[in-house]
Image (tube, rainbow, N blue to C red):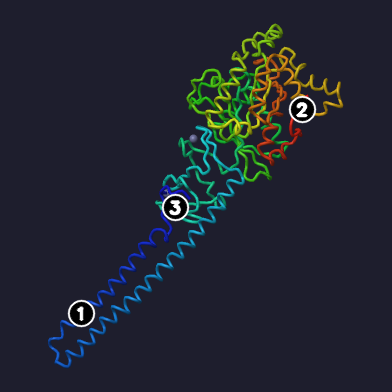
Amino acid sequence: MASTPQPAKKSYFFDKGYKDLGNTIKGAWVRNWESVKNYADNLKDLGDKSAAGKWFFGILNVIAIIAVFVFGSAITAVITVLHIVILLLFMLLVYIGFSCIWLVDRIYLLRNKIFTACHECKEKSLIPTYICPKCGAKHTNLTPGIYGILHRTCNCGEKLPVTFFNGRKELSAECPHCGHALSDRESRPICIPIVGGRSVGKTAFITAFSKEFIENIAPSKSIDIEFYNSRKEDIYREIKQDYDTGSTRMTDRPQDVTQASSVSFSFFAKHPTFTPERLIHVYDIAGEVFTDNNENEVQKQYEYCQGIVLIIDPFAIPSIRYKYEELLEPEDVAGIGKADINEIINSFLNKLREVTGMSDNKMSNVPLAIVISKIDSAGLDQDVGEMAVNKLMRSQPDKFTDYYDTQDYLCRKFLKENDMSSFLSNVTIQFKVNRFFACSAIGHTRDKGKYQPKGVLAPMQWLFGLADNKMGQVWNDISFSKKPTYFDE
Ligand SMILES: [Zn+2]
Ligand SMILES: [Zn+2]
């Protein structure tokens, strides 16, 4: 119920009602005074009367003046008070009315975790700026209030709905912060940034996940997908093309109009149990953000994201690179992430603190999936991949019963054995909810044919399930234990 003036007509009782009251009161008193004056004038006109007549009419008029002055004023006063009381009563009723509906609207938005995460500037807003379909006026606070309980009338005369249940979300909207057109429809966003240094395989991860989720998972779970807008549809066309050719081009997407260092791939997910529908934003955050600190755009999405995927390129770890370099294809050697992983995690943590103004405590509530990428290369599958997990589960079937807990265990062990203990402890101290995964997004050396992804869905399913119960119930291929169980041993 903010007080920003809106381009709309105020409700009668909060605008014209006052004026009408003022005019009526003024009118009554003026009429009262006028009749007093009339009788006073009569007194002056007694000249032509006889002496008895003067006395008689004189007294009559004086009585009339007193009567009008005393009783007329009293009655006018009573009527004035009555008028004020009635107006106040109606105002109160309208006030209570819009407050109740406002509260219902607010509770609906908050309970359903509905908000707008601008796909361009990444700013969060509860209610976007809605646009009048007739005149284009911007309604920055289209909620029940003094402009109307269920509807408001725009200055142009157009009637606009002001609640979630009578069609507000059908209006076009824009971001209150940057003015970009929004396609949000009071949906519930699930926001997952994919982070990591340059060339660690973030883009390949997003390509593989998006294609697999949209084309395999969604249909099998009766989830309907709709792209956020035509721009996101273009991104998906590129994703499909990259998927089919084995390329990874999204990172160096030069045609990115906004020059933003993070691009969101956004789509709606609809399912009978998703009320409201879900809006999934997957952010591809340019690796430069983590290596050079000159990035201007603030990554607002960290403020509200429900989970983060941190991808690490195992071949950027010196001891692993040293061990395996000769087993890698030349293209893969060229594609190794150059930045030091400890540096990356540090600048990532700094970024998080800076953006969110978060205390370490709040930060630690965001679930973090740490994904070791490129495990198809140089036989890493035997260390952390499916092969290794199955082997360990077969050799110690009593202890290792859960596939993803076993993978988590192997990933942590792998990092520890490769001098990454400080990274490990940094991550586990900062993020209470963390889980390690291993994946291969392309499944083979890049540019050598179609993607054959392995392990890209599990981290996302884990984060989606934590972000949203309903989503977790619908996309339930893997059941994750509450916490990876073997690490502390
Ligand atoms: Zn914006
Ligand atoms: Zn209008």
Identify the residue position indicated by label 1 in the image: 40
Please tell me in which quadrant of the rendered image residue 239 appears: top right
Q: Earlier in the sequence, mark 1 or mark 3?
A: 1
Distance between the alpha carbons at the discs numbered 3 and 2: 58 Å
- The response on whether ligand 2 sits within 8 Å of label 1 is no
Kindly state the secondary structure of the residue where label 2 is placed. helix
Q: Which numbered dot is residue 379? A: none
Q: Say which quarter of the image contains residue 190.
A: top right
Chain-order first, disc 2 or disc 1: 1
User: For this view, does 84 lie left or right of residue 50?
Assistant: right
Disc 2/disc 1 C-alpha distance (Å): 101 Å
Q: Position of residue 162 (x, y in %)?
A: 50, 51
User: In this rendering, which labeled residue sits more in front, label 1 or label 3?
Assistant: 1
Identify the secondary structure beneath mark 1. Answer: helix
Numbered badge on residue 405: 2
Q: Kindly identify the amino acid type of the residue bearing the numbered disc 1.
A: Ala
Specify whether tag 3 is near ligand 2 (CB below 8 Å).
yes
Return the residue nearer the eye: 279 or 102: 102
Mark 3 or 2: in front is: 2
User: Which label's residue is closer to the chain start, 3 or 2?
Assistant: 3
Q: Is residue 149 above or below residue 197?
A: below
